[in-house]
Image (cartoon, rainbow, N blue to C red):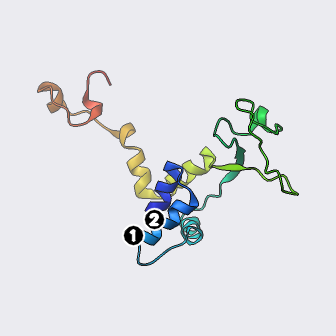
Amino acid sequence: LRLLEIKAHSNMTNDMYSEIMDAFNEQNISLYCATKKLSSLVSIDPIWIDCCLKSCCAFTGNLKDLKECPACGEARYKKNSKKKVGIKKMAFFPLKDRLIIQYQNFNWSLELQYRANYTMSQEYLQHRLYGDIFDGRRY
């Protein structure tokens, strides 16, 4: 699953993912299996949005009806397809769903409340030391 995370953050292609799995893993896990495993662990489904081939824009909001990118002119849809199939898609995870997942785990929800519950120590103030970023005078 770590490689799946790296794939998502680095815009890695599916072919590159497969090559890395072949090179470094005795137990070759396909992209499909890794995605299914992640889906079973995290109860959130992405909303798939067409985007420009060159990542200039996402075809959403006031751009949702366009057939080509307003910035570079690249076509939105594949040419030889009977249905309108976007050339490139991006996954969008609504903020509400992400927050629900973050706070479902009790221990993690406590971690997320750290800043709100942090109390500055007088010991740090007196000796001009910093126990945490929140002990600074500018914070």
Determine whether the residue tagged by mark 2 lies in a helix, strand or loop: helix
The residue where tag 1 is placed is: 24
Q: Looking at the image, which residue sits at the far front?
A: 80
- Give the x, y percent position of residue 114: 36, 43
Residue drawn at 76 percent across, 35 percent down = 61
- In the rendered structure, the answer to whether residue 10 lies left or right of residue 76 reads left
79 up-or-down from 23: above or below: above
Residue 134 or 62: which is nearer the viewer? 62
Residue drawn at 44 percent across, 57 percent down = 106
Residue 96 or 38: which is nearer the viewer? 38
Which image quarter holds the C terminus?
Answer: top left
The residue where tag 2 is placed is: 20
- Give the x, y percent position of residue 28: 48, 75
104 up-or-down from 55: above or below: below
Residue 67 or 2: which is nearer the viewer? 67
Disc 1 to disc 2, how far (Cα)? 6 Å
The crowding category of the residue bearing disc 1, from other C-alpha atoms within 10 Å (few below 14, some 14 to 19, many at least 20), is few
